[in-house]
Image (tube, grey):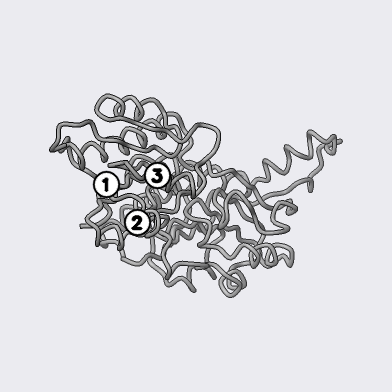
Amino acid sequence: MADGMRPRILVTRELPAAGMKLLEQYCEVETGGANRGLSRRELIGKLADKDGLVSLLTDQVDRPVMDASPRLKVISNYAVGYDNIDVEEATRRGIAVTNTPDVLTDSTADMAWALLMDVARRVTEGDRLNRAGGWTEWAPLFHLGKEVTGSTLGIVGMGRIGRAVARRAKGFDMKICYFSRTRLPEEEERSLGSQFLSLEELLATADFVSLHAPYTAETHHLIGRKELTAMKPTAYLINTARGALVDEEALVEAIRKREIAGAGLDVYEKEPKMAPGLSDLEQVVLAPHLGSATRETRDQMAATAAENVLSILLGKGKAHRVHA
């Protein structure tokens, strides 16, 4: 920094060592803790004398928070998404906002695939049954699931993660259709074996609908009552993107009425809370936001978040800015 002082950084939750060591090498670092997140009051209080913030998706960084942080120069989000940050306000104040793209593509795609396989073949449901002593003998009609190989996968949002899921689907000889804000080039569509459809066509066609769209005001409750009713009664919904893409209350109703067969969820609109009745449904696999939860990915996310801070404050390397 211009005055030669080490930048002062607030990390709202203890990160993997790969990121913490890098920050501590160049900065004075205060950490919120390992076992719980900071309250809003704590966040505002601790930020008053900080030059940089490393935040989580659960940290709402809005105008009042920025008002309390006159020295703040960078908000480094430990995530790909950043709708927890008022980017427009940060831009107006000259505060850089960064994220951690690319590094969690494969781990999140793997998680989507794990949920798809689990809910289709009723693995978690069978595990609960087995542990409770409910399996007494093998039978031809016992605990039947859905064949994945050769089925139709509908991908909503064909960004990095959506394309990674499509590549996995090819290995299962699945028919792949997708809906996305921007259509892929024809060559990439051919490479992935994918067909572009409207959302309505995709919902009516797919045996599995996997969500990979970003969360914006336009995509809030992208999958609601109308869209769930449009799906096949034998179809499954998979969500590893953002919880608020789905109207959870409508999802509970659709599964109870057997309008769709089930769902595999890793994200929720009001995490860690879920809509009433969701956890009672046998046909739903509920993961606790594990999309990026591999040691390798979380380490790389931490390193990237730290590098973003050092790039903005000390000119070391290139930051992954989410705005100009």
The CA distance from mark 3 to mark 2 is: 16 Å
Q: Kindly indicate whether the residue at mark 2 contacts the one at mark 1 (C-beta within 8 angstroms).
A: no
> Mark 1: few, some, or many residues within 10 Å (few <14, many ≥20)?
some
Q: Residue at x 15, y 31 (%)?
A: 4
Q: Secondary structure at mark 2?
A: helix
* Amino acid type indicated by mark 2: Asp
Q: Secondary structure at mark 1?
A: loop
> Dividing the image into 4 quarters, which one contains the N terminus?
top left
The CA distance from mark 1 to mark 2 is: 10 Å
The CA distance from mark 1 to mark 3 is: 16 Å
* Amino acid type indicated by mark 1: Arg
Q: Which mark is residue 55?
A: 3
* Foreground tag (1 vs 3): 1
Which residue in the protein does label 1 denote?
71
In front here: 46 or 215?
Answer: 46
Name the spot of residue 229 as percent of width and height, x first.
62, 72
Name the spot of residue 36 as percent of width and height, x first.
55, 37
Which residue in the protein does label 2 denote?
67
Q: Quadrant of residue 304?
A: top left
* Foreground tag (3 vs 2): 2
